[in-house]
Image: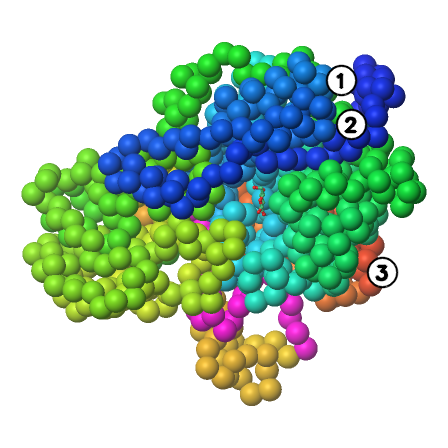
Amino acid sequence: MNENNKLHHQPDPYVETRVESLLSQMTLGEKVGQLVLENAFAPIDWADVIQRQKEAEERGEVFKIDLLPNPVAVEHARQGLISAINSADLQINNQLQRAAVEESRLHIPLLVGHDVIHGFRTVFPIPLAEASTWNPELLERAALCAASEAATVGINWIYAPMVDIARDPRWGRIAEGAGEDPFVGRAMAEAHTRGFQSTDLPAGRRIAACAKHYVGYGAAEAGRDYNTVDISERTLRDVYLPPFKAAFDTGARSTMSSFNEIGGVPGTSNPFLLRTILREEWGWQGVVVSDFNAIGELVQHGVAKDLREAARLSILAGVDIDMESGAYARHLAQLVENHSVPLEIVDEAVRRVLKLKFNLGLFDNPYVDKDLSGKYILNPEFRSLALDVARQSMVLLKNSQTVLPLQTGKSRIALIGPLADNHSDLLGTWAITGQAADVETVYDGLKQYLEDADIVYTQGCSISGKEQEDFSSAVSAAQNADMVVLVIGEGADMSGEAHSRVYLGLPGRQQELVNVLAQTGKPIIAVLMCGRPLVVPELAEKVDALLVAWHGGIRAGQAVADILFGAFNPSGKLTASWPRAEGQIPVYYAHKSTGRPAEGSGTKQYHEPFRSTYLDETNAPLFAFGEGLSYTQFDYSQLKVLTPVVPLDGVLKVSAVLKNTGNLPGVEVAQLYVRDLIGSVTRPVRELKGFQRVALQPGEERQVFFDVVVSDLGFHGQDNTYRVEPGEFQLWVAPDSTSGLEGRFEIR
Ligand code: BGC
């Protein structure tokens, strides 16, 4: 067990005693109650809510849903029959908390869970964008900000970080994680966990993070959400598990069992994942909650004949809390009484839950009495952090003839596109508590740099409408301007949960809009907003500059304007490959060699006879992992492998010199990759093992050092145990996953 993990699981004698004392007083019904998460709200007419929300957005007003507490949950809280609720409503949280703490026999407080995935009221860029900052320290602060805001309404449990590795952009939930790579995934999992669980939270408020979805959810076949997963144990251990392990080693107090099956066994009834790996191998002692109704879904999976059997399988597998399926509430007590489930298993789960509540300080401080919202919600520090994250998350992928940055007062701009003056879509996929009225659009941002007479806005077309569009006003705006800023892409509801897509080009008529504007001959700067890597070779070819702005949160518009006008020099780099064609998916940099690798590289690996290539497209993605441009240039030189031979218990040390050879200050994300040349099982052609953000003034150069402990250069062998094998390795210090200075070292 890692030192941090040990630290987080030091038994606290005071807590242990209180837990045992409570446990000894509990009836079986109350014990089961501690394993039940129930819906906090009375039924809602969602169609009506969405309609009213839209109307409020159109009026630029902040929208609030009028929620009523679920009377059943209130009664259950009084009787000590529930342990947790999902809610972000202060009144309801306090009301239910009071029922549990003051009216129930044993006065056990409730966990209040919520999806705070990329901000609470201060909405940050989607996590895939956040990862593109390659700046864990910044993201830790963003997570702390989200947790601070969430705590003001009584939330004490955040269903994040989402640490699923995703190599298939069809999968809508790629938006919610850090992308395709386990090394980046680990760094972001640690940063988010540290931020959410920070001890710098408002006094008396503590939050438990929940690393999800345990595990393999991102490997859904064909990128269709909830679909079957069938990956080898080795891939699971080498690629999908490491970010979870990183979150737990950082102290994450809970995890969520996933919806998907792996090789025939659903994540929510999987003792190998939930007991053997989590408890026996890792010694982790946190709480496992099922995903929403995932226990109930064991029936549809076809491994349980009814809800009762689903409850039995899940508790035996190691799921502590049942999120909203009702299976434990209805059947668990009886399963214990008729000896289908040993009482000790239930006791163990209850102990974990009670411990969590004690460790969060909930017994001493269950309510949000003081209104802290004024201090914490959308405060200037958070808003400026959101701007910082948005600016650092954006990735410049093309800048022909250095069309960017623009110069103030020198250009008349036609601002075109369905996302150019759009508020709500910039919030992205998980922004339940976000408000469209808080969002600065690109139009708002540009107006700070341009006189009114120098900017003409027209929408051009809708995001996804299929009907014929009249592009004439867009064309005439372009003709009368010096250049076009085209803000296009996906709506917020085109990625995220249950929002997978098979066509990953620009939705609706947007590519046609690009094509007609390209015919005007005016320079086009495309700002692409999206929740996933898109397939946009035609767009990339036709425009002069391409800036990926993702769904960038409340400050996205300002961030885009700052980048376009050079007030901020872009530094973001991709953490997921952008395919050239959907047929290449999954395409990721850390692929294997195969017995017949393509001989060409990049666009040259094309229809090589009897090689692992395609007849009609190259293997290479359009934009590779690690790629991203700056307004300045960086030169890499003088690679030094300081430890050409390194022992198994040693540290690999490498350095290189980075120089800013351009005219502007900038930040370069320098990356260290390795390749284990011969292994007892096949190894990826490159694996990221380090990265650094290096800030350099024009003309400045600096030697940068990478240290990698050799024990991090291993993998799971034929017997699925972890090992580092002696032998020769290649390495690269590189600006991206396709190039770099190359060297060698040997582990002996
Ligand atoms: C999602 C989880 C989420 C949960 C609770 C599920 O549908 O898969 O990510 O935390 O709902 O809202």
Q: Type of residue at label 2?
A: Glu
Question: x and y percent of residue 6 in the render?
Answer: 78, 30
Q: Nearer the viewer, residue 206 or 526?
A: 206
Q: Label 1: state its secondary structure.
A: loop
Question: x and y percent of residue 678 in the render?
Answer: 74, 66
- Asked if disc 2 and disc 1 are in contact, CB closer than 8 Å, the reply is yes
Question: Marks 3 and 1, how far apart in space?
Answer: 49 Å
Q: Type of residue at label 3?
A: Asp
What residue sits 81% from the left and 47% below the top?
A: 312
Q: Quadrant of the N terminus?
A: top right
Question: x and y percent of residue 56 in the render?
Answer: 29, 36
Q: Quadrant of the C terminus?
A: bottom right
What residue sits 84% from the left and 26% below the top?
A: 27
Label 2 lies in ligand 1 vicinity (Cβ under 8 Å):
no
Would residue 461 be visible to someone looking at this image?
A: yes
Q: Nearer the viewer, mark 2 or mark 3?
A: 2
Question: Marks 2 and 3, how far apart in space?
Answer: 43 Å
Q: Mark 2 vs mark 1: which is more N-terminal? A: 2
> Would you name the residue on which mark 3 appears?
719
> Would you name the residue on which mark 1 appears?
106
Q: Type of residue at label 1?
A: Leu
Quadrant of the displayed image that contains ligand 1: top right
What span is colored magenta in the figure? Answer: 569-595
> Would you name the residue on which mark 2 appears?
30
